[in-house]
Image (spheres, grey):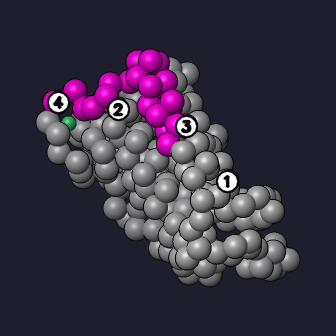
């Protein structure tokens, strides 16, 4: 474990500094990233997701995770979990793909996130969520919400770079705690409940409603 942390610390900024040293080499990864997000948006709509919340009101933030607006507008409390995605991708890619230029690591992270959104919003996963989690009338995110999630992932990636390993880890833990108190859900709980649903957690989450 301590060896893993050493590798993470050493590789965190590996390669040339990206934000301070923008160059033409970043053009292609940037364009490729925009292309991936656009393809994901059209694929999401193609597989049946609405562009925006069915309510038709264009507010950007939906704070109540139990309302029908949750995961339908651009941002909601779950957006925070997607900032954590971006940070986690940054760490994982610093660990396993440190030789890849950072701009391409960024592209890879956003591609993984876009794929996650497409899979998360497939009929198979939507039905599974409904069956095993608290989301009883879950119909999948709107395309706008998926785009908002990807924007948050971008933010998380940049944030991890800015904060460095140690502060990123602290941010991650605090964000997980805030989410558990705030909406009784978080990135880690989300993964646990999707892979291995635990009845006691489900009861606790319903109890918060
Ligand atoms: Zn709405």
Q: How far apart are the two marked residues, 2 and 1, measured between alpha carbons?
A: 28 Å
Magenta region includes residue 50: yes
Residue at mark 4: C-beta within 8 A of ligand 1 = yes
- Magenta span of residues: 33-56
The residue depicted at 74 percent of the width and 73 percent of the height is 14
Does residue 188 show up?
no
Q: Residues within 10 Å of mark 1 (few under 14, many from 20)?
A: some
Residue at mark 3: C-beta within 8 A of ligand 1 = no
Q: Is mark 2 in CB contact (under 8 Å) with mark 3? A: no
Q: Residues within 10 Å of mark 3 (few under 14, many from 20)?
A: some
Q: Which residue is mark 4?
A: 55
Which is more foreground, mark 2 or mark 3?
Answer: 3
In the orientation shown, which residue stands out farthest toward the left?
57
The residue depicted at 61 percent of the width and 48 percent of the height is 28
Residue 33 position within the rendered picture, expressed as x and y whole percent measured from the top left: 55, 45
For residue 190, the mark is none
Which is more foreground, mark 3 or mark 4?
Answer: 3
User: In the displayed structure, would residue 8 be above or below residue 69?
Assistant: below
Q: Secondary structure at mark 1?
A: helix
Q: How far apart are the two marked residues, 3 and 4, measured between alpha carbons?
A: 28 Å
Q: How far apart are the two marked residues, 2 and 3, measured between alpha carbons?
A: 17 Å
Q: Nearer the viewer, residue 194 or 71?
A: 71
Mark with earlier residue (1, 3): 3
Which is more foreground, mark 2 or mark 1?
Answer: 1
Q: Secondary structure at mark 3?
A: helix
Magenta region includes residue 170: no
Mark with earlier residue (4, 2): 4
């Amino acid at each position: 474990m301590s060896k893993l942390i050493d590798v993470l610390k050493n590789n965190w900024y590996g390669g040339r500094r990206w934000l301070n040293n923008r160059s033409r080499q970043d053009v292609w990864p940037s364009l490729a990233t925009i292309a991936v997000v656009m393809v994901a948006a059209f694929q999401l709509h193609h597989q049946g997701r609405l562009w925006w919340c069915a309510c038709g009101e264009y507010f950007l933030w939906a704070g109540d995770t139990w309302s029908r607006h949750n995961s339908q507008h651009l941002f909601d409390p779950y957006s925070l979990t997607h900032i954590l995605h971006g940070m986690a991708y940054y760490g994982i890619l610093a660990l396993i793909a440190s030789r890849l230029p950072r701009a391409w690591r960024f592209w890879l992270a956003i591609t993984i996130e876009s794929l996650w959104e497409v899979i998360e919003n497939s009929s198979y996963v939507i039905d599974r969520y409904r069956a095993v989690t608290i989301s009883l009338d879950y119909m999948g995110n709107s395309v706008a919400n998926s785009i908002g999630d990807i924007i948050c992932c971008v933010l998380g990636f940049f944030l991890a770079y800015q904060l460095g390993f140690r502060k990123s880890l602290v941010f991650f833990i605090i964000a997980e705690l805030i989410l558990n108190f705030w909406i009784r859900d978080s990135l880690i709980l989300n993964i646990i409940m999707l892979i291995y649903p635990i009845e006691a957690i489900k009861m606790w989450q319903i109890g918060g409603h």
